[in-house]
Image (cartoon, rainbow, N blue to C red):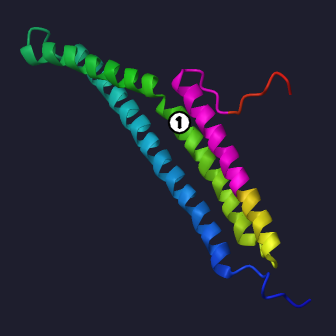
Amino acid sequence: MALDHETTPNATELERLYKRVNVQIGWYRRDRNINRTFYYGFLILSIVCAFSASTIAALGDSNDKWVKSALVILPLVATFCASLIQQFNWHAVYELREQGRIDTLELLFLVQRSRPRTADALAKLEETVYGKLIELSRRQARGFFDSSKGRDKLEPRRDANA
């Protein structure tokens, strides 16, 4: 079957769509890494401070000034870290962004596998990809705001009318 060159999509148009999806993957990857770093960093710091305070309490001289200071400061830092983890809900956002990255990766594979032979086929592919990106953005927004309210729901809400 011969292609009609006037209606055959240009390779740069498909490349533009590919780059657009790839930019989204980069954003999800960066945001996931930031949230993962904060979550695990503050979690480990909290655990180390709590363990250190217990160890100092058990082995230190209770009359020593630095022991008293450490027994106040270390639990304070551990509590502060735990509060930050709870308040910002970094683990839920980390999980949410990882799911967004995976969903966007599926779209990237869709674009890579697609070989639209006409401009209409390319337009349909663009409509599908952008529609799924918009749907993904809505799910991400709902999940982010639900997690920031402490509901920790990563799945989209179900309409009562559906």
| Residue 139 among those drawn in magenta | yes
Residue 102 vs residue 115: left or right? left
Residue shown at 27% from the left, 24% from the top: 52
Residue shown at 65% from the left, 39% from the top: 138
Residue under label 1: 93
Task: Return the residue nearer the eye: 159 or 98.
Answer: 159
Q: Position of residue 30 (x, y in %)?
A: 46, 51
Residues in magenta, as a range? 130-154
- Determine the main secondary structure of the stretch shown in magenta: helix
Q: Position of residue 135 (x, y in %)?
A: 70, 44
Above or below, 87 against 7 in this view is above
- Quarter holding residue 159: top right
Residue shown at 61% from the left, 61% from the top: 21
- Quarter holding residue 51: top left
Q: Secondary structure at mark 1?
A: helix
Outermost residue, top direction? Answer: 63
Residue shown at 71% from the left, 67% from the top: 111
